[in-house]
């Protein structure tokens, strides 16, 4: 009797481990297109990702680099102070209203022939907002310093 209980317990544990492994595999498979890694321009310049990889790049829009073409296409350069990456936005939507030179931005897309082809642009939400990842990257480069809270 005791051997049967032990055998049954081992079978239940094995079935639970198998179900957990299958669940994790299915979740990973379902999220494979939804996970976009964030990179700074310096990281992209040092190790360019393959053209098939979709990722996010963030930094400041370099002053004097923004060129608006007909329709929604934009050309600009994103920088973190250590490297500059040219960006071409080809999204179906107009860029955010607050998107402009000298502001923080995060773009989603892929790197092709040294140019980042963006399909989505995010911009600051108000006068002081900048995505946390962009602030961290700019602070590491010494280009940006977080404003001190007023007392």
Image (cartoon, grey):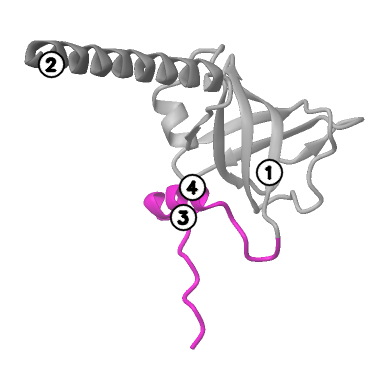
Give the Cα separation between the discs numbered 4 and 1.
Answer: 12 Å
Which residue in the protein does label 3 denote?
Answer: 143
Quadrant location of residue 105? top right
Q: Nearer the viewer, mark 3 or mark 1?
A: 1
Give the Cα separation between the discs numbered 4 and 3.
Answer: 14 Å
Q: Nearer the viewer, mark 4 or mark 3?
A: 4
**4 or 3: tag closer to the N-terminus:** 4
Category of crowding for the residue at label 3, using alpha-carbon neighbours closer than 10 angstroms: few (below 14), some (14–19), many (at least 20):
some
Q: Is residue 72 left or right of residue 52?
A: right
**2 or 1: tag closer to the N-terminus:** 2
Give the Cα separation between the discs numbered 3 and 2.
Answer: 63 Å
Q: Nearer the viewer, mark 3 or mark 2?
A: 2
Residue depicted at x 51% and y 48%: 134
Which residue in the protein does label 1 denote?
Answer: 122
Furthest-bottom residue in this view: 151
Question: Contact, CB < 8 Å: mark 4 with mark 1?
Answer: no
Q: Which mark is residue 22?
A: none
Category of crowding for the residue at label 2, using alpha-carbon neighbours closer than 10 angstroms: few (below 14), some (14–19), many (at least 20):
few
Which residue in the protein does label 2 denote?
Answer: 6
Residue depicted at x 74% and y 49%: 99
């Amino acid at each position: 009797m005791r051997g049967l209980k032990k055998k049954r317990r081992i079978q239940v544990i094995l079935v639970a481990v198998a179900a957990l492994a299958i669940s994790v595999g299915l979740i990973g498979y379902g999220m494979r297109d939804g996970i976009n890694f964030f990179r700074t321009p310096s990281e992209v310049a040092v190790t360019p990702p393959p053209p098939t990889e979709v990722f996010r790049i963030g930094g400041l829009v370099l002053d004097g680099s923004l060129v608006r073409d007909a329709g929604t296409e934009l050309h600009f350069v994103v920088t973190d102070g250590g490297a500059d990456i040219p960006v071409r936005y080809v999204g179906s939507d107009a860029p955010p209203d607050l998107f402009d030179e000298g502001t923080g931005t995060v773009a989603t897309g892929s790197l092709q022939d040294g140019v980042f082809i963006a399909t989505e642009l995010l911009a600051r939400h108000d006068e002081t907002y900048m995505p946390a990842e962009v602030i961290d990257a700019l602070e590491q480069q010494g280009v940006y310093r977080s404003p001190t809270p007023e007392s």
